[in-house]
Image (tube, helix red, strand yellow):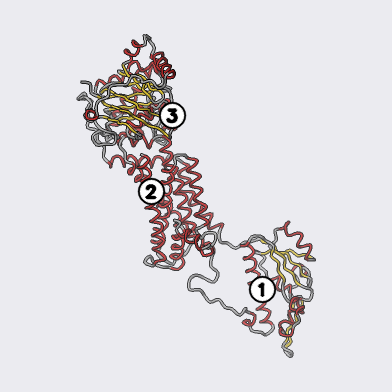
Amino acid sequence: MVQYAIIVKNARKAYGEKAVILNNLNLSVPSNTIYGLLGASGCGKSTLLSCIVGVKKLDSGQITVLGGEPGSKSSGIPGPRVGYMPQDIALVDEFSAINSFHFFGRINGLGSEEIENRFLELKDLLQLPSRDRLIKQMSGGQQRRVSLGVALLHKPELLILDEPTVGLDPLLCENIWNHLVKITKMGTTVIITTHYIEETKQSNKIGLLRGGQLLAQSSPTELLTRFQTDSLEEAFLILSQQQSQNPHSCFEQPTIQSAEEMHEVMTLSRDPEFKRILKSSWQSRMYALLLKNIFQFIRNPGGILFALLLPMIQIITFFNGIGGDPKDLKIFIVNKEAGNCDDGRILGNITYDDYEQNCYFTDISCRFIKGINNTILEKMFYENYTQAELEIPDFSSVGIMHFEKNFSLALEERIKDPLNMPDNLISISQIHVGLYNPNRQINLFAQRKLYDDFFTEYQNILKECGIEEKYGKVPIKFENPVYGTLEPHYELFVFPTYILIMLHIVATAYSSTIIISDRHSGVWNRILVQGVKTAEVLFTHMIWQCFIIILQVTFMLLLTFLKYDTHCEGSIIVVIFMTLFAGIAGMAAGFFISVVTNNQSLACYMSVGTTYPLTLLSGLIWPIEAMPMGLRWFALSMPVSMPGISLRKVMQKGISIDKPEIFTGFFVIIGWILGLLMFSLFLLKKKM
């Protein structure tokens, strides 16, 4: 009785209603044979193989592999019982040839010594490049040979090769086919797909696949005899023409066993020298995956620059570019009283009459002008207001300061008898300032500095007139605040939210990029076929990226507190953990993006797209309290808004973690981490 390694019964797989890939396909692969699956590109070969190894699921039908359904314990597939070479190269670019062998060897349960020995054996057979040459530095043919080598490495019971000989030297192809014939005699079943029809004459059995249907399944000799030709390609052509002329006809289908018999399918005994116990532990798989993540990082200069140097550069840029006082601003002055004060030589004169206890001012406008800080506001003088107004666009002036002709006399009267002054004198005694800069921050800053300089000089003038300074103050006094200072630094307000946003964005971009790179290259699916669990892949990514995040946080906080001497009123431990969680939340967001799409460009758009709502709704640019109530609650639910508020209260107010305003921030960010990770796992299982 013939025993079968693989039986496919009534297999159907479609993408949408019209794109039918497998159309009620039946197929049987005898154990310890070479089965050549032939067909043009797009006929369904790769899809069928993906279903056999458990990467994809059929819409309907049954598949039995090595005695069980793919994914079941009785089958052992996915796992080390199968060796799989996909159509894509599916190797890690940052690996060398020997790294690739150690990676797949550890995943399949091999020890280091055995991996080295097998590498030497396969190196001669496949003409592999030097052991230390990186995959990304190899030619396409060399990469394909390494890919074939790691599929053969652990001597699997079932070997599935998708287009293994494309682009290879004819002599090398002959050596590969001879080796495949040899290992089938030792107990391995081989399925090989190719569109080079003639090279499958060494197969024990071939199947001709077209349009999702198996046109024929028999030995090459039987097929040639049946169509009275010496060319398999000509036989395939005749079958294809028959299908095109009568697409609804029933082609020869293999005899399929009953469902009960299908579960008894098993391979024949293997050669004792070739027989092995194929088991891999989760420890060896995770060790291999961790090494992969490390090599992908350290052998990618762009990744190092992005993940480590960029955050430090951003911190340095932040503290040097944010929060300082503007300098070299220009203000136009129209002084009808004293012009340009003789280029600053006229300082204004105050004469105090002890007898009348009155002050007399001469050119006092020059006194106020001199009191303006030159490093902040550069003074430019004009003879009239109209001329100054016309030249504002040319010099980017913040505004125009205007003194009336009798300013000193009017101010003198204002101090002497303010209650009996006419309106016109009150207006003349005022310094008229018009701000013309559209930059709100510049206007507010200039306004505050002019107020401060004016009141400082005004109080000095009153003092010289024998009047106590307190009478020159505005009748409102701001006491020292409970937290901080009267003039808080803007960068200290912005920094807590800024560092959380930056860590979140960098982690999102990095994690989504590296996972999508694995999926796009085929490495993800290939290691899943070898028995690696999705949870193991994600967990090892989490371990390595958490290490990267720890490095980022360490460097950033060292710069913040040591280099820029930022003061923290509360616990540094709370600051460290809040920033770590921000990075981990970004990593979880990257995982989610990589699950939603495997398109690198779309993932980039999604990563960048999340940057703007995070920034705009975090309170970084504008207070959350100014938002409409509905938007405010939405903003507070974002992964960095409430944590940013909590971090600010720790750093500026010294509030401990047991207070609601602090642990609420932790609850929000941990909730996002858990939610994104669980949703990512759910979507992955659904896709599988």
Which of discs 2 and 3 lies nearer the camera? The answer is: 2
Q: Position of residue 70 (x, y in %)?
A: 29, 34
Q: Position of residue 113 (x, y in %)?
A: 27, 33
The circle on residue 679 is 2
| Label 3: how many Cα within 10 Å (few below 14, some 14–19, many 20+) | some
The amino acid beneath tag 1 is Phe
The image quarter in which residue 333 lies:
bottom right
Q: 121 or 663: nearer the eye?
A: 663
Horizontal relation, residue 408 to residue 99: left or right: right
The circle on residue 454 is 1
Give the total of numbered labels.
3
Q: 679 or 463: nearer the eye?
A: 679
Label 2 sits on a secondary structure element that is helix
Residue located 74% across and 90% down the image = 356
Q: Is residue 112 visible?
A: no
Q: The C terminus lies in which quarter of the figure?
A: top left
Tell which circle, 2 or 3, labels the residue nearer the N-terminal end. Answer: 3
The amino acid beneath tag 3 is Met
Tell which circle, 2 or 1, labels the residue nearer the N-terminal end. Answer: 1
Q: Position of residue 632 (x, y in %)?
A: 49, 61
| Label 2: how many Cα within 10 Å (few below 14, some 14–19, many 20+) | some
Residue furthest bottom in the image: 355
Q: Position of residue 1 (x, y in %)?
A: 20, 20
Q: 62 or 457: nearer the eye?
A: 62
Dots 2, 3 in contact, CB < 8 A: no
Dots 1, 3 in contact, CB < 8 A: no
The circle on residue 138 is 3
Residue located 41% across and 51% down the image = 549
| Label 1: how many Cα within 10 Å (few below 14, some 14–19, many 20+) | some
645 over 235 or under it: above or below = below
